Amino acid sequence: MKGYSSQVRLFPVVFESGHGVTLRDVDGNTYIDFSSGIYVAGLGHCHPKVTEAVQHAAATLMNAHDFTTPVKLELLEELTEISMGDLNGVQLYDSGTAAVEAGLRIARAATGKLEFISFYRDFHGKTMGAVSLGRLDPSQGLRAPGFHLAPRPDTYRRPFPCTDEEYVAWSVAAIRELIRESTSGRLAAVVLEPIQGWAGSILPPDGFIQALRELCDEYGMLLVADEILTGLGRTGKWFAMEHWDTKPDLMILGKQLGNGFPVTAVLVADQYKEAVETISASTSYGGNPMACAAALASLRVITEEQLVERAAWLGDLILKRLEQIKERHPIVGDVRGKGCLLAIELVKDRETKEPHLEAGREVYQRAFRKGVAWIPAGHILRLSPPMIMEENIAMRALDIIEEAIAEAEQACA
């Protein structure tokens, strides 16, 4: 059985091992990992310090339910230290979806309100509350009550000619109309990805995140930042919200936190942290000693190896090369990103910006065959190399991607 996900169906490889920035399949083929194991292994596969920490924990104590352990205490202190502002309430989980669901319950408990505003094409997980925050396949039925979707600005696909400032104003006006016309007014929180991941590494225009902060303050809503994908250095800052100098009331971390080991966290501002105790926050596997060891080791590696700064440097190099690729290939409509969170958007025509789905599939598969493991999103190809990647390896991967683009242009002509 190959698996059910679209990514596996597009390229049904069987991986056997990974080391650093490369993966190896059962047939002995080696791939440059331009996906960080779906945004997880930002420190590279099997980083020796993370591996050693997990091995030690596995031989000492695997699980102690929600009780405190020395490694858990160290991790909580470390998370508090690196978090923005005063996010001092921390609870650990074993998946992003579980952490998002906990965040929703905390927001309701902290505000005494029930409803949420989130954004089209954001992705927050695959259980009902998390799914209701974002995309919902019609086959899955109705969105849960109390969840309201708003448009958010995509600067490449503006609905009308406008400046960034005008676009932000239009988006905020649309949210106000949604609040007035579609909600009961009992709004607990606005939930968002600072940079959209599944939708294709879509950056908000400057001013949008700050406007959401002001809107939340005006209506008495919490601002919840889902930094599962964007956090812990990937975008060239510890947290993506720092790019817009904006503090959330609640932040969710995951993916890169354990560098492959399942561990996530909900961080809550001081004034709301008592609400965590009211939501039955316990979890069977979240915060077990192995998870805490992996997370603690990962945070220390990011600091010791200055990977936040390195992600910014590497991202600038890659984005510059992507701009050159765009100049040479008409099917490349847009390239964008921050740090090691980037994307290539393929179009049939740069004027109409019609998505080129066939080219997206072709480029993805051709580059994979040539040795680049990465992430598709229809006509958008997502790039997220490990933060430790060397320049020459990144440029080799981009050579392969450009070869695949050139071949796809001919095949789809």
Image (cartoon, rainbow, N blue to C red):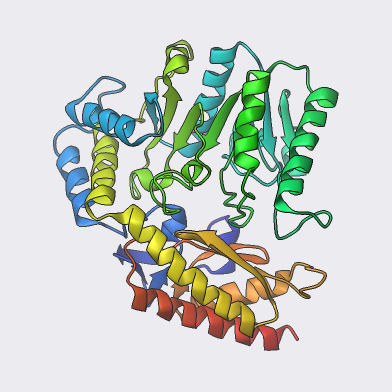
Residue 189: quadrant of the picture: top right
Query: In the rendered view, does 135 fall on the left or right side of 273?
Result: right
The reply to whether residue 41 is in sight is yes
Residue sitting at x 61%, y 10%: 112
Query: In the rendered view, does 181 fall on the left or right side of 214?
Result: right
- Number of marks present in the image shown: 0
**339 and 99: which one is in front?**
339
Residue sitting at x 60%, y 44%: 123
Where is residue 147 drawn, in percent x and y? 71, 28
Image quadrant in which the C terminus is located: bottom right
Residue 84: quadrant of the picture: top left
Where is residue 407 drawn, in percent x and y? 62, 87
Query: In the rendered view, does 281 fall on the left or right side of 124?
Result: left
* In the image, residue 61 above or below residue 341: above
Residue sitting at x 17%, y 49%: 52
Where is residue 228 drawn, in percent x and y? 47, 42
* In the image, residue 266 above or below residue 115: below
Residue sitting at x 67%, y 35%: 118
Where is residue 368 drawn, in percent x and y? 50, 75
**128 and 330: which one is in front?**
330
